Amino acid sequence: MNYLSNMPPPQVGSFSLKRENNERHSIGYAFVEGDVESLTELTLLLSTQEQQQLESFEYPRRKNSYCLGRVSAKLAMQQILTKADLNTITVDNGVFGFPVVKGVQEKIQVSISHSDGLGVALAHFEEHPVGIDIERIDPDKTSVIETCLSNDEITLIKKKLMEPYGNFVFWTIKEALSKILKTGLMLDFKYMQIGNLEKVKEGVWISHFSSFSQYRAISFTTQHYVGSVVLPAKSTFELPDLFALANAFNRFVKR
């Protein structure tokens, strides 16, 4: 497919996560930038139901966010599905708003996020969940997000010298976890408390939860955006895969 807009082409790829028994689980990813107009050709990937849903939105902002989410989801699925007609697959919504993939034989699901004209998605098979969230750093939102953090989390951010973007990192971690749990942010924030945080390399962080010890988060930070991926704690990245994902994120948000 040719990309005819003046927007940069999507960043797509896949990586594998390794379990203790040496099982590997493939994860597809896609980063997409644009709006409905610039992504016209990519909307051909949408199913009839998705096309109808897209056209039903009255406001451009909602229309654009839906388009970004669905297009990035289709491209992420394409990375791990060997044979699939993407426009016969529908990404619908569950009762709490989480995405549900329909129309494909494989038990595949997606995690979707969008922010300020950027859309991201991870595609995974049901036996190995992952969640993703992305957020633009907005100084006007810093104090609001801080009200959702515990005193211990605020202390941890200051200790790790993560200001001014630390609040946004913690927000994306909690968002990504809520997507795995399929609760949205209706779950009390105290149950999603982040207990520790370590720097892997410049712009890459790993954290763990105080209550949900079965999960951990990997976060990426840049000057203007942060993003977090939550995955089972005992699943490991190969370092080249981790750094490749970090580099794809950096290239995607670089402006």
Image (cartoon, rainbow, N blue to C red):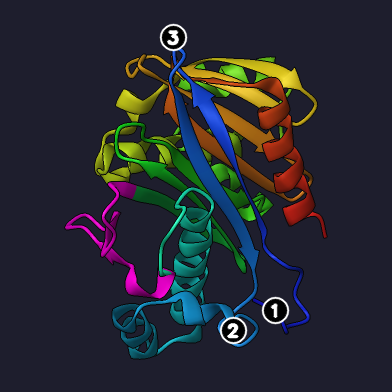
* Neighbourhood count class around disc 1 (C-alpha, 10 Å): few under 14, some 14–19, many 20 upward: few
| Amino acid marked by disc 2 | Glu
Q: What residue span does the magenta drawing correspond to?
A: 86-108
Locate residue 149, reporting x and y percent: 46, 31
SS type, badge 3: loop
Residue position for label 2 = 41
Residue 194: say if magenta: no
Q: CA distance from mark 2 to mark 3?
A: 42 Å
Mark 3 or mark 1: name the one nearer the start of the chain.
1
Q: Which residue is mark 1?
A: 2
Tell me which amino acid carries mark 3: Glu
Q: Position of residue 27 (x, y in %)?
A: 50, 40
- Residue at 44 percent across and 16 percent down: it is 19
Where residue 96 appears, as percent x and y from the top left, is 21, 54
Disc 1/disc 2 C-alpha distance (Å): 8 Å
Q: Is residue 62 left or right of residue 189?
A: right
